[in-house]
Image: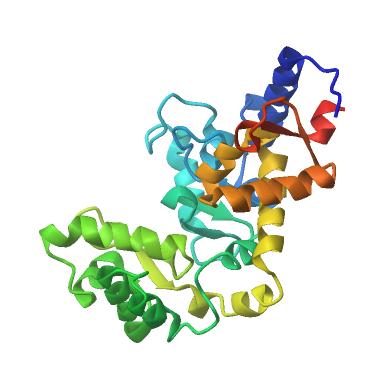
Amino acid sequence: MNISISPSELNQRLSKYRTKTFRSEPHLRLKNQSEAIQFVNDRGFTFFWPITGIIFPSLWVAVAGERPVADQHDDPAHITWRWKDNLLGSKEWYYAKVLRKKATIISLQSLPYFYALSRNYGSPDEDHLILYEQGLLSIEEKLIYEALLHQGPLDTLALKREAHLSSRQNESRFDRALASLQSDFKIIPIGIAEVGAWRYAYIYEITTRYLPEIIENTRFIDETTARQYLLRQYFLSVGGAKSEDVIKLFHWTLLETTQTLQVLLDDRFLTQFDSINSLSVKRFFLTSLIN
């Protein structure tokens, strides 16, 4: 495809586009919880914090603006943190460590497409056992999942005890397992308990017990359709990216990524800008951004 726009003009358009979708300018900042929910619904999915090395919208930037380092002290009145905590268990959105195993907020409309790509096949009582037998689930993940399965929702401290992972030497193993289970949509934080030294701990629950409708909502979504949907949402947020950016965020294989990109190119949703032989290093942009 012949493209008359210059690289500098394209970069200017991309920067302007991201200012709007990231809500990074002061006049675009989110002012209340309702606007935060709408922001996530518009984007489909976002990070909670900005993640180093990943160009993608975050609730934090949309509230507090761009910062060199984002932390809980960098948010005026801690409002972003408070909104996130207030909405745990509200079913207004889905919050867990998903993309890159970092705090991710997903709209309920986009959620089934993520779930369709997870290693869940419809049986909350048995899926984890199959994965464990196949060596795809660690013993720590199995213990944590089964503690929630048999005991119901548990705060972090109680969950450590029930999973027999409360010793100091098990702390990193527990944290890794907790993040892994969240990233595969097996467990989800649904509230806050005032326990521990900081009087603050997440309460976790089995995802399909908290959102039983997710199984039915995902039933007719195949993996190919799911990737196409998520990649469209991704580009609607970032405007343009390389295929390695996609792989880095979603952890898809190169083949899965290139096949999905090709569909979006064929549909003229995306346009390839660079004339580089290897598809894996070419840049892709929303066609609407170039025309």
Q: Residue at x 45, y 48 (%)?
A: 100
Question: Residue 268 or 83: which is nearer the viewer?
Answer: 268
Q: Residue at x 45, y 70 (%)?
A: 186
65 over 7 or under it: above or below: below
Q: Quadrant of the N terminus?
A: top right
What is the x, y in percent for residue 125?
Answer: 43, 86
What is the x, y in percent for residue 144?
Answer: 30, 73
Question: For this view, does 266 lie left or right of residue 232?
Answer: right
Which colour assignment does the render follow?
Answer: rainbow
Q: Quadrant of the C terminus?
A: top right
Q: Residue at x 66, y 45 (%)?
A: 234
What is the x, y in percent for residue 153?
Answer: 37, 76
Question: For this view, does 220 lie left or right of residue 199?
Answer: right
Q: Residue at x 48, y 73 (%)?
A: 207
Question: Residue 264 or 42: which is nearer the viewer?
Answer: 264
Question: For this view, does 168 lie left or right of residue 190?
Answer: left
133 over 3 or under it: above or below: below
Q: Quadrant of residue 238?
A: top right
What is the x, y in percent for residue 248?
Answer: 50, 42
Q: Quadrant of residue 113?
A: bottom right
